[in-house]
């Protein structure tokens, strides 16, 4: 009961709050001891199956705890030559008897990062539910004392998809690329392949004569779907007739899905050789284990030789903070921090961004995309972490449509940034 009282302090809209209390009470009461010592329902559990056989589904195994309560153990992934391990992505489909009510407990969130424990969940972590895998609703989950997430599912006559964020799958990227292929302002180049051989595309948008350019990378970590939604909104908005003024000022280069293997296999962070694609940027990538980064480095070198070096680079991620991450370890680029401050001002003015900045003068985050591109190529680069739990300005969990809107708004941000 103390857990219920504690969660009553969470802010949010009333429907979100009421759903949360209902779920807590249901899981609380079905966990009470069974005076008969067994399940009274004919045939036992109402669960039929938990399906993880589709693309982007997360590896897991489950245990029946009785009384229609199930412990779902997510499978950790491990970094190469490191004790680091990660979990944070869940995506699966639950099949149950009509009118069933299940209590699910997600387990294995005790990550390790650089010798320290780290936790990808909090009391504000939602989970997303859908009956068709297309239309999603964010619902609360209870953070337990032993670092698990607990929530309930109420079934009608359809399975329920469950996810950590609103998913964006490879098939959605393929549809986007198919939709824009052949447009006079679009060029799609395959610059390499992932560890498992999936193609890596760079999408170039705009006029070759545009004086400035922006490079954007998304989905370096498998679970971080927010960047793909931003890219979807950005690309589609840039190709509309009303975007004509932007064409005179800048061009876009976009690597829309840098870690396709992790997306396909439902992993959280590392590529298929155990490499973190947001690390190692202090030196050339090893193409044997990080072909994704090696391909991007080759493309960047070609741009620089052609005199087409990007003026700004943004690496889109998801975390629980939502901030811009700046790494500026030296004094060789005195204009970097003032320019990043201007970018933050433009974001605050023209988008729903309010979360602020982490890092700054003297801050050193070795090997990250932002620091590596600044020190090795002289490109003003940063990591933008989209908050996966809550949009501060809206005070609610984020949806794909919110991130698409941000992508559309970035067009105006870049326009004024280059003035």
Image (tube, grey):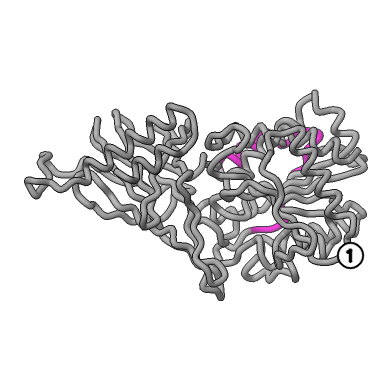
Residue 132 in the image: state x and y as whole percent. 42, 32
Question: Magenta stretch containing residue 242, yes or no?
Answer: no
15 horizontally vs 188: left or right: left
404 horizontally vs 171: left or right: right
Q: Say above or below: 288 vs 404.
A: below
Q: Looking at the image, how many numbered discs can be counted on the residues? A: 1
* Residue 177 visible in this rendered orientation of the protein: no
As helix, strand or loop, the secondary structure at mark 1 comes to: loop
Q: Residue furthest left?
A: 36
Q: Nearer the viewer, residue 400 or 202?
A: 400
Q: Nearer the viewer, residue 348 or 298?
A: 348
Q: Quadrant of the N terminus?
A: top left
Residue 87 in the image: state x and y as whole percent. 47, 58
Q: Residues within 10 Å of mark 1 (few under 14, many from 20)?
A: few
Residue 44 in the image: state x and y as whole percent. 15, 44
Q: Which quarter of the figure has residue 262?
A: bottom right
Q: Which quarter of the figure has residue 414?
A: top right
* Residue 278 visible in this rendered orientation of the protein: yes
Q: Say above or below: 372 vs 18.
A: below
Q: Say above or below: 191 vs 131.
A: below
Say which residue label 1 marks. Answer: 332
Residue drawn at x 62%, y 59% is 194
Q: Residue furthest top?
A: 242
Q: Nearer the viewer, residue 338 or 409?
A: 338
Magenta segment range? 171-193
């Amino acid at each position: 009961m103390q857990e219920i009282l504690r969660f009553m302090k969470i802010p949010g809209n009333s429907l979100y709050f009421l759903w949360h209390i209902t779920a807590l009470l249901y899981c609380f009461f079905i966990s009470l001891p069974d005076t008969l010592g067994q399940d009274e329902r004919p045939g036992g559990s109402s669960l039929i199956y938990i399906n993880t056989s589709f693309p982007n589904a997360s590896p897991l195994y489950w245990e029946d705890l009785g009384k229609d309560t199930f412990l779902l153990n997510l499978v950790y992934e491990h970094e190469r030559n490191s004790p680091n391990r990660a979990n944070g992505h869940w995506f699966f489909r639950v099949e149950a008897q009509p009118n069933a009510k299940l209590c699910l407990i997600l387990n294995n969130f005790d990550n390790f990062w650089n010798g320290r424990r780290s936790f990808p969940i909090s009391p504000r972590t939602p989970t997303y539910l859908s009956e068709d895998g297309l239309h999603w609703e964010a619902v609360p989950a209870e953070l337990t004392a032993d670092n698990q997430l607990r929530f309930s599912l109420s079934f009608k006559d359809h399975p329920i998809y469950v996810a950590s964020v609103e998913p964006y799958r490879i098939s959605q990227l393929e549809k986007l690329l198919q939709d824009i292929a052949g447009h006079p302002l679009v060029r799609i180049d395959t610059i390499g392949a992932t560890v498992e051989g999936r193609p890596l595309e760079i999408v170039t948008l705009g006029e070759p004569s545009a004086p400035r350019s922006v490079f954007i990378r998304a989905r370096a970590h498998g679970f971080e779907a927010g960047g793909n939604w931003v890219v979807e909104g950005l690309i589609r908005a840039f190709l509309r007739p009303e975007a004509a003024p932007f064409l005179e000022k800048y061009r876009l280069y976009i690597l829309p899905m840098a870690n396709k293997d992790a997306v396909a296999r439902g992993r959280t962070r590392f590529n298929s050789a155990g490499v973190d694609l947001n690390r190692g940027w202090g030196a050339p990538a090893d193409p044997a284990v990080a072909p994704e980064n090696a391909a991007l480095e080759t493309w960047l070198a070609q741009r620089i030789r052609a005199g087409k070096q990007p003026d700004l680079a943004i690496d889109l991620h998801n975390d629980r903070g939502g901030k811009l991450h700046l790494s500026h370890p030296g004094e060789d680029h005195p204009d970097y921090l003032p320019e990043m401050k201007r970018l933050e001002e433009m974001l605050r003015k023209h988008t729903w961004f309010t979360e602020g900045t982490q890092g700054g003068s003297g801050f050193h985050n070795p090997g990250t995309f932002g620091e590596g591109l600044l020190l090795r190529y002289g490109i003003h680069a940063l990591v933008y972490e989209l908050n996966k739990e809550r949009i501060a300005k809206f005070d609610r969990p984020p949806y794909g449509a919110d991130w698409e809107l941000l992508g559309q708004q970035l067009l105006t941000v870049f326009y004024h940034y280059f003035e």
